[in-house]
């Protein structure tokens, strides 16, 4: 990856899971550790970018050179992303944002009260990356991820089109890859092209993905 290739450019990256409260002590979450998003923040810094990292709850130390905004829920992540979207040149949505949250957050701890079953009503969250892409302040390049357990290429490219993304990086999740592990592999798609990035440490993979992002970013100047 060319050092300095993103000098003067602002990159915003989301990372980690979101926590969707059920009551004051419980929440719905997922297995994201934040490692892929934090590795991308390091790669963008290494390319000379100014980096804003909007992070869900993780057990990682953010690079000191980037501005880190910590959030818990999908709605907090959306708010912070949209507050900071102006002047962002490249947006990378690597966070595993909850698609659904409890429709009601109970004010007190829900009691078991002898129940053998209970039903939680969930409502859809707002899609952050689709909102960024449709925004009047749309960054020049919007990059998403797709976490899939089957039909990776098909599902990833359809998400790219539905959400209005320039690039999508699809990854298999489960069985020791994707979520939480040190390594990952990506199938990257853009309009009219794509590239497979083989399994490797997330920090190296982040450099390889950043190289593709930089190429597509500069290619946009000529299209
Ligand atoms: O954090 P790690 O343990 O290192 O794991 C990395 C990872 C597997 C979480 C990461 O590589 C990854 O795949 N991130 C995206 C996870 C995800 O939510 O994928 P999705 O296919 O459900 O969503 C597609 C895209 O829409 C993503 O860019 C996501 O950030 C975005 N999205 C989804 C829902 C929502 N409400 N708002 C969004 O912006």
Image (cartoon, grey):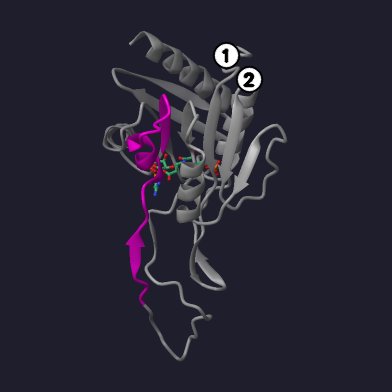
Q: Which secondary structure, mark 1?
A: loop
Quadrant in the picture for residue 35: top right
Residue nearest the observer in this picture, 131 or 169: 131
Ligand 1 appears in which quadrant?
top left
Examine the rendering and report whether any part of residue 170 can be seen: no
Q: Which residues are magenta?
A: 119-145
Q: Are marks 2 and 1 in contact (CB under 8 Å)?
A: yes
Quadrant for the N terminus, please: top right
Examine the rendering and report whether any part of residue 220 can be seen: yes
Point 50% across, 23% down: residue: 209
In the image, residue 150 lies in the stretch drawn in magenta: no
Q: Residues within 10 Å of mark 1 (few under 14, many from 20)?
A: some
The relative height of residue 171 versus residue 115 in the rendered view (above or below) is above
Q: Residue 70: give x, y in percent of width and height.
A: 61, 49
Nearest to N terminus: mark 2 or mark 1: 1
Determine which residue is flagged by label 2: 48
Query: Which residue is situated farthest in the right direction here?
Result: 64
The label shown at residue 5 is: 1
Q: Residue 91: give x, y in percent of width and height.
A: 47, 32
Q: Residues within 10 Å of mark 2 (few under 14, many from 20)?
A: some
Point 60% across, 31% down: residue: 51
The relative height of residue 140 versus residue 132 in the rendered view (above or below) is above
Judged left or right of residue 123, residue 84 is right
């Amino acid at each position: 990856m060319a050092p300095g290739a993103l000098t003067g450019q602002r990159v915003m990256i989301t990372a980690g899971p979101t926590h969707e409260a059920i009551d004051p002590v419980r929440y719905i979450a997922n297995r994201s550790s934040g490692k892929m998003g934090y590795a991308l923040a390091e790669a963008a810094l290494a390319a000379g970018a100014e980096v804003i990292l909007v992070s869900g709850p993780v057990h990682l130390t953010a690079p000191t050179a980037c501005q880190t905004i910590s959030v818990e829920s999908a709605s907090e992540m959306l708010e912070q992303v949209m507050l900071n979207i102006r002047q962002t040149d490249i947006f990378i949505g690597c966070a595993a944002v909850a698609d659904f949250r409890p429709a009601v957050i109970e004010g007190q701890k829900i009691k078991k009260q002898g129940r053998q079953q209970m039903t939680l009503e969930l409502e859809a969250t707002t899609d952050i990356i689709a909102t960024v892409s449709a925004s009047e302040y749309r960054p020049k390049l919007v990059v998403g991820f797709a976490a899939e357990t089957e039909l990776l290429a098909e599902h990833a490219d359809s998400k790219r089109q539905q959400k209005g993304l320039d690039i999508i990086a699809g990854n298999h999740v489960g069985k020791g890859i994707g979520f939480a592990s040190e390594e990952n592999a990506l199938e990257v798609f853009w309009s009219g092209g794509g590239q497979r990035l083989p399994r490797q440490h997330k920090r190296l993979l982040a450099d390889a993905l950043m190289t593709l992002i930089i190429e597509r970013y500069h290619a946009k100047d000529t299209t």
